[in-house]
Amino acid sequence: MLAAGGCGDSSTAPTPTGLSISAISPSAGSTKGGTAVSISGSGFSSGATVTIGGLPASVVAVQGSQAITASTPASSAAGPVDVVVTSGGRTATLTRGFMFVAPSGANQPPVITSIRSTGSRTNQPSGFADLDETITLVATVTDVETPASALTYAWSGPGAFSGSGGTVSWRAPAGLSPTPSTVVVALTVTESFTEGMVSHTNSASRTFVIDVHDSQNEILDMGEDFLTLFSRSEVPTDQVLHSFSTTCDGGAGRRSEANDVDKNRRDFTQDFSKFRITRRPPVTFNFGGFCASPNGPRRADACSSFTVHWEVIYRNPPDTGKRGVADGIDYVTAVLEGNRWSLCHSDFRGTVTDLTTGLTRQLIW
């Protein structure tokens, strides 16, 4: 009796292709790394990794089963090294397949002598920006062997960069918090040169600090805080003036305002429940310039103003107990000192009404 044939235990699946490396091109590169190489062989598959001299290559891309491209790592030592590809759980080695060559040191790296910024406002200090403001960054770079225009510039850091080379535009982050905050941007300048048939690079890096402000709100907040504290008779003079500079205008603004606060405390009791204040944006900026005020031009970097309403009770005879109302505009100047805004002067123009007699007079102080 003949038995019919059936499925046995043998497999007809193809045997996996072996992994091998046949060559790397170029076969020599700088110890600085960054040499673009092509590795040829067989059995390469997606996800393959490459080491050269035991160091991982970067930008590894499998071009097909017979080709991989990569960028060489930096090496601390010159000499021949192994090239290793790992793919699909298998490893192939090209023994002493790549030669690291060290530069002689005769070629000097670039020098970044300075970085400065130019803001969007006249006389704006270097290293200052407001939220979402675009400023210009300018690097001064020298290189003995290579003109600055032939160097490669890489800017990095928070915010957005546009342009190329040693002069670029930088847009400050719009949502940075708190303000002011310190932001650090970095510049790396790279020179490429050939020595002994091998391409090398020299690089130099430098950082630049930018103080990012929300100047509109910072100054308006300080001005409103000052006028609010002024309107509370129980608050000591030094606390009222805590945001005032002691050096702006030789300290004259703070001294004058201290005299005004002291006189107000001596002659009146403020009815804080009746105090009203309204901001009058925008703050205007004139770095190193002047602000208009009822008492004449005030040297300052920024100018702000507020509509205010005060009601007071007179303390001195013969008007003791009388009530008065002041309405008008208070002009508050500010200066940028270091990386902080401070107030400088406060000048009021408005009217004062005696609620007993109904008489109104103009007032500037």
Image: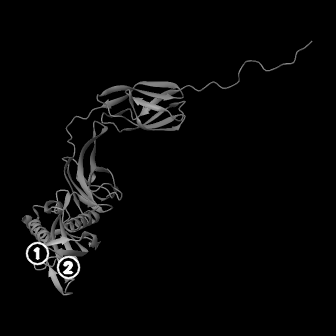
Q: In this view of the protein, which residue sits in the foreground, 63 or 8?
A: 8
With respect to residue 166, does 230 lie above or below? below
Instruction: Please identify the quadrant where the N terminus is shown.
Output: top right
Quadrant of residue 140 within the rendered picture: bottom left
Question: What residue is at 38 percent from the left and 26 percent from the top?
Answer: 54
Disc on the earlier residue, 1 or 2: 1
What's the amino acid at mark 2?
Answer: Gly
Q: In the rendered structure, which amino acid carries the disc numbered 1? A: Asn
Q: Does 153 sit above or below residue 350?
A: above
Closer to viewer: mark 1 or mark 2: 1
Residue 287 appears in the figure: no
In the image, 204 versus 320, the foreground residue is 320
Q: Nearer the viewer, residue 250 or 225?
A: 225
* Numbered circle sitting on residue 324: 2
Question: Circle 2 sits in a helix, a strand or a loop, which is it?
Answer: strand
Q: Foreground: 47 or 142?
A: 47
According to the picture, the residue beneath numbered tag 1 turns out to be: 316
At which x and y percent is residue 286?
19, 70
How dense is the environment of label 2, judged by Cα within 10 Å: few (below 14), some, or many (20 and up)?
A: many
x then y, percent, for residue 7 = 79, 21
Residue 334: in sight, yes or no? yes
Quarter of the image for residue 291 reads bottom left
Percent position of residue 118, x then y = 23, 62
- How much space separates mark 1 and mark 2, taking CA atoms? 13 Å
